[in-house]
Amino acid sequence: MKEILSNRLNRLEPSATLAMSQKSSELKAQGIDVINLSIGEPDFDTPESVKQAARQAIDDNYSHYSPVPGYPVLKQAIADKLKKENGLEYSPAEILCSNGAKQSVCNVILALVNAGDEVIIPAPYWVSYPQMVKLAGGSPVFVKAGIEQDFKMTPAQLETAITPRTRALILCSPSNPTGAVYSSAELAALAEVLKRHEDIVVISDEIYEHINYVGSHASIAQIPGMKERTVIINGVSKAYAMTGWRIGFIAAPLWIVKGCNKLQGQYTSGPCSVSQIAAAHAFSGDQQPVEDMRQAFERRKKLIVGLAREVEGWEVNEPDGAFYIFPKVSALYGRQHDGRTIENSNDLALYLLEVGHVATVGGGAFGDDECLRLSYATSEENIQEAFRRIKQAIAALQ
């Protein structure tokens, strides 16, 4: 039998973040002490009250298929959260729950994008966005927003990127990989451009909403006239340290929710029943653990930014959310060590892993090869030791 995979699959690239995490694991399996700053996952445990809700759900026999869009109790908890925390009115019918926010994003793209359609993606971007657009047969259109503009797209850049084929814009705030956060004023300025192009849907990835260091979260759906054309993506993974529970959701106009429900019903059905009950408790229960984790991330951010600014050849801005820094490291390109030359961000990431035993991810995977992504979702002790190793490794470059 010929080993022939579909053209659709062959167009996709493997996830660079998962690849670097795998390389890190392989070195660890060889007995090498690697500090992993490559993975975008909180190092905290799920709050105890959420775990207790899951145990109770098992005892209450939540062990059968759920409705495709999720249990009513979870969708109501999400609607209540959106009203209380974001000032946005959604009915449970305008909410659909999926197997993580990643599936939520992919559902929306597959439901909206046809072959030849364009989707605007500010760069740097999360690695999966362009791959999902390609999967749908669409074309990603990248808008370069570098460190000099705090990694945020301007209205003028957005206007220039729009064509008659533009179907959607993907926004991520707080951002993976940069930690950039759009203010209400910045979102309003982007909205003014979008209002001149009425057929463009905004896919607003807000999964890092609660890991925010500048005050209340701003969503483009809050701008008058934008809720009707915005899909909010969110979930429990980051705020509640529930990455493995796999619960994400969309809040969107009913016609989009119906389309995603039709799609999801054919390839996964509803998400895990027990996880849904746990997530409903997470949204409706005590929010103090969320704030405790946010404060811990903020302390780590201050630590890692200070240490990163001490590294020769690195330019570091101040991230306002999420748990990443995205330093510009291209000043080191061309340097050598023991016969190897650092030509790009991936070379530097591999060098730091193999020589410094610190796992990072090259910025090329995120659309900016001048930078490097480091996650500070780890202990302060790990951060301090990681930068001791990083400084030592970079000092060895000639």
Image: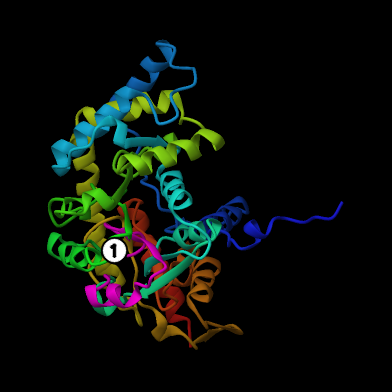
- As rendered, which of 56 and 377 lies closer to the eye? 56
Magenta residues span: 152-178
How packed mark 1 is, by other alpha carbons closer than 10 Å (few <14, some 14-19, many 20 or more), is many
Residue 191, position as x, y percentages in the image: 20, 63
Q: Is residue 215 magenta?
A: no
Q: Is residue 170 magenta?
A: yes
Q: Residue at x 50, y 40 (%)?
A: 263
- As rendered, which of 389 and 209 lies closer to the eye? 209
In the figure, 253 relative to 245: above or below? Answer: below
In the figure, 215 relative to 266: above or below? Answer: below
> Within the image, what quadrant is residue 89 found in?
top left
Answer yes or no: is residue 48 visible: no
Q: Residue at x 18, y 35 (%)?
A: 288
In the figure, 147 relative to 187: above or below? Answer: below
> Disc 1 marks which amino acid?
Ile
Residue 334, position as x, y percentages in the image: 50, 88
Residue 351, position as x, y percentages in the image: 53, 73
Residue with the mark numbered 1: 304
